[in-house]
Image (tube, rainbow, N blue to C red):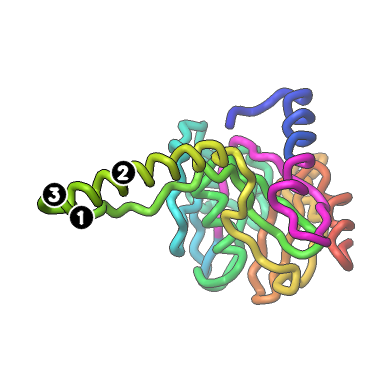
Amino acid sequence: MADLSALDQQLLREKWEANLPEEWLAEGESLSWVLLPEQGYIGSTVGGAHCLPHEPLSGVASSTVDRPEWPLPSEVVGSGAFLDDEWADDPSVLQWVFAGNAEQDAVRFGDHVAEMPGSAFVVLSSSRLAVVVEQGKIAEPAGAEPEGKGWLGKARSAAAQVQKAAEGITARKDAKAAVSYHEVPLSRIASMSWAPLGRSIPRSPFLRVDFADGSCLFIRDRAAEANAHKFPGGR
């Protein structure tokens, strides 16, 4: 997704805030906030090793999103030569993961955002934090069906093709539907807080998500302070 004007961002936000209750929220669940996709990268420090741009470290369903040709982060940040939180001063860095190992929640979350460059919405509801995408952006699992032999096999193959075509029509209708690409229940999140980072003045606003397993995710968010308060017990 290309960087949008302020008006287009507002319209996109209004569209998703209207669609999510119809397509994604469960009965009795309420929407807290939606973070729109932006052009930028995810960095990570997993087991003490820095990686930018972050590459998925766990099993992630492939996406249909093309790899972006965005300007890369600065050499200092990309090489891991930064000190403390200087990575936050690079505007191309949208998120940063800190974890001890690849199995932790912050890494899994970052893995899924990285696989959907410029297309992943981050959504908080009254019961979960999720990476939400349009259904059509999740690639179908690869795997060819065996070819039938003889007239019976050909008949079955033809019927399967008709069924697949019918399913394809339905799928195309639902391609824009909002679905969870990855999500965690709020019980697996210890806290959310506003975290101004970097050495620039003013400091860059980030939303800090501390998971119960000890991993942490920083998300660049202009409304981080307000959004942190929308998490139960947020600050």
Name the residue at 50% across, 37% down: 172
Looking at the image, is mark 2 or mark 1 earlier in the sequence? 1
Taking 7 as reference, is 106 left or right? left
Which marked residue is nearer to the observer: mark 2 or mark 1?
Answer: 2
Name the residue at 78% across, 23% down: 7
Q: Name the residue under label 2.
A: 161
The furthest residue to the bottom: 213
Query: At label 1, which amino acid type do we have?
Result: Pro
Q: Which span of residues is magenta-colored?
A: 17-44
Q: Name the residue under label 3.
A: 151
Any magenta on residue 21? yes
Q: Mark 1 points at which residue?
A: 146
Q: Is mark 3 on a helix, strand or loop?
A: helix
Query: At label 3, which amino acid type do we have?
Result: Trp
Count residues near mark 2 (Cα–Cα under 10 Å), then give few for <14, some for 14-19, many for 20+: few
Answer whether labels 3 and 1 touch (C-beta < 8 Å): no
Q: Give the percent coordinates (x, y) of residue 93.
A: 61, 44
Name the residue at 56% across, 63% down: 107
Count residues near mark 3 (Cα–Cα under 10 Å), then give few for <14, some for 14-19, many for 20+: few
Which marked residue is nearer to the observer: mark 3 or mark 1?
Answer: 3
Residue nearest the viewer, comparing 67 with 167: 167
Q: Is mark 2 on a helix, strand or loop?
A: helix
Looking at the image, is mark 3 or mark 2 earlier in the sequence? 3
Q: Give the percent coordinates (x, y) of residue 131.
A: 63, 53
